[in-house]
Amino acid sequence: MARRGRPTVEITLSDQERATLERWARRPKSAQALALRCRIVLLCADGATNTEVAHRLGLSNPTVSKWRRRFAERRLEGLSDEPRPGVPRSITDDQVEAVIVKTLEETPVGATHWSTRSMAQAQGMSQSAVSRIWRAFGLKPHLSETFKLSPDPQFVDKVRDIVGLYVNPPEAALVLCVDEKTQVQALDRTSPILPLRPGLPERATHDYVRGGTTNLYAALDMASGKVIADMTERHRAVEFRKFLNTINRSVPEDLEVHLIVDNVSTHKTPEIHRWLLRHPRFHLHFTPTYSSWMNMVERWFAELTTKWLRRGTHRSTKELQASIIEWIETWNANPRPFVWKKSAD
């Protein structure tokens, strides 16, 4: 009797193909569908019929026949899934362009910026469609950032001066970033803080009781990360001069001292000028106007605020000062210098 149906395709594997199929079939990270197809081809190459392969792997005959034929036609590439077209796109290029132009050049009535809902209503499409278009083109109307341009006529020179001290400090000299954190408040919550619990964060009342303020003077050593600090009741040139004396006593006499400071008026008074004339090893370097962020001690102040002050409670100025001193001593026991990465350009 003559055999009916489509003839079975013979599978012959090269050594490299067999090694690849065996590796894909047993590799844990292979997709299970790909591993199964590899096992089908390997059994077919060993001479098993479609019925035998289907019985051994628990598959249907058409499935085995499909992957035998696919491998015979396209070899290893044929075992991958073919791309599927999916649902045709319902939004035209003109509609996409209209959303982008409207987002960039217009604002909605009664609002300062578009939302996905207001844009969808204006353009007659779904909110999810607007969201996909904005995401594809990186548009985020809900975000707003601020900036400040420095009007300092010596901006470029000052930037190069400060960055030069950071990346290439002078020899036999100490570079200190000096600034004040003024009006540090001693705050106590109106009720005791509720501690952290499984499933619950630490909780504190939103209101607080003020217990006074203090002014923190700090000088950050760029080489070691250690901090020289002092606290005062007032913020004047007199207090800054006293802090300069503290720095002078703390730094070995054989070292030149370069101080990076901002443009606060207390740093430029005649009293400070006279002090600098009496101490010629001290050199002041001013950050550009409105650019005190270049002073690295500001980064240290941020560490103090986020890790110690913001969630701390202090009932009096004396308690606040003792708490700050404790944190500074802990910092200086294991200092971590900040490293400036950006070039002046």
Image: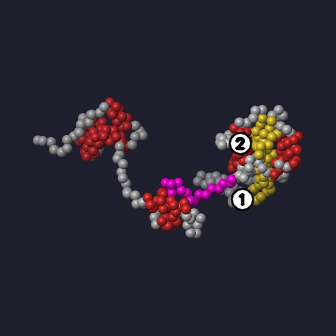
In the image, taking residue 53 as reference, residue 253 lies left or right, namely right
Q: Amino acid at mark 1?
A: Ser
Q: Is residue 318 above or below residue 259?
A: below
Could you say whether the residue bearing mark 1 is in a helix, strand or loop? loop
Q: Quadrant of the N terminus?
A: top left
Magenta span dominant secondary structure: loop
Q: Residue at x 53, y 54 (%)?
A: 138
- Residue 189 placement: quadrant: bottom right
Badge 1 is on which residue? 191
| Residue 250 in view, yes or no | no
- Which stretch is magenta? 134-149
Residue 251 coordinates in the image, percent (x, y) = 81, 37
Residue 137 colored in magenta in the image:
yes
Determine contact: label 2, label 1, CB under 8 Å: no
Q: Select label 2 or label 1 by which is in front.
A: 2
Q: Which residue is mark 2?
A: 160
Residue 340 percent coordinates (x, y): 67, 41
